[in-house]
Image (cartoon, rainbow, N blue to C red):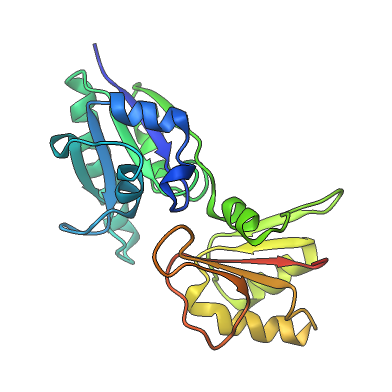
Amino acid sequence: MKGKLYGIGVGPGNPELLTLKAKRLIEECDIIAVPVKKAGEESVALNIAKGAVEIAEEKIRKIIFTMEKDKTKREACRREAAEKITDFLDQGKNVAMLALGDIGVYSTYAYVHKIIVNSGYEVEMVSGIPSFCAGASRAGISLVEGNESFGVIPSLKGINQVEKSLDVFDNLVIMKVGGHVREVADLLKERDMENKAIIISNLGMEGEYVGALIPDREYGYFTTMIIKKEM
């Protein structure tokens, strides 16, 4: 009998936000697959899970997902990752693949999910708490109220993207915005909205910052901005 693949969202950083279902499946699965960008790299998702679950080292398998700009190389790497996982499934082993936040929100897992589903294997996606939901709660604000609209941008791909989104949505989330905070701050100032943004950085991790947008502050990779027209 072939094994089953579980895509598991571990939440944004604090192990206490791991769901009970995620904890149970991580304990029960034979293999814990963790995405990394290169060999030898630590996995943030794995470290979060280890804060809530005892995981035997022999169960852990690091799966490389390259961040090469070459699309062909990225796709080849994803196929290779899927093949490694299906090898375990063919051995009858159940596999839990971990990802930060929610498994369905800009998750690395999505790249292998499609391949493995199309190959006829049994899979299940297990929700986790997205960083912007946990971050809004940590900041003491709601993401949306009443009839307000809400949009999410995965990362800044040009300030025009933010301008267009602000014209459409009442509330906007910009993920992985760390290196572009100044650009967005300048745009918000032009629109007289500089006090309408909250920064969520390293949530539940060392160096956490949740508070007002400070343009000259340095922010890391795990930085999200929430913009609310009615703050």
Tell which of 184 and 138 is nearer to you: 138
Tell which of 208 and 214 is nearer to you: 208
Task: Check the image and name the residue furthest to the right.
Answer: 147
Residue 156 image offset from top left, x and y in percent: 55, 70
Q: Is 142 rendered above or below residue 54?
A: below
Task: Give the residue drawn at x 54%, y 71%.
Answer: 157
Residue 188 image offset from top left, x and y in percent: 72, 80
Q: Give the tally of numbered discs.
A: 0
Residue 224 image offset from top left, x and y in percent: 55, 65
Residue 183 image offset from top left, x and y in percent: 59, 83
Tell which of 174 and 117 is nearer to you: 174
Q: Is 22 rendered above or below residue 41?
A: above
Task: Check the image and name the residue furthest to the top.
Answer: 1
* Residue 79 location, quadrant: top left
Q: Quadrant of the C terminus?
A: bottom right
Task: Give the residue drawn at x 58%, y 76%.
Answer: 158
Q: Quadrant of the N terminus?
A: top left
Q: Give the side of residue 63 with respect to residue 138, left or right.
A: left
Q: Give the side of residue 133 with respect to residue 126, left or right.
A: right
Q: Give the side of residue 72 with respect to residue 137, left or right.
A: left
Task: Check the image and name the residue furthest to the left.
Answer: 58
Task: Give the residue drawn at x 41%, y 61%.
Answer: 205
Task: Give the residue drawn at x 26%, y 36%.
Answer: 54
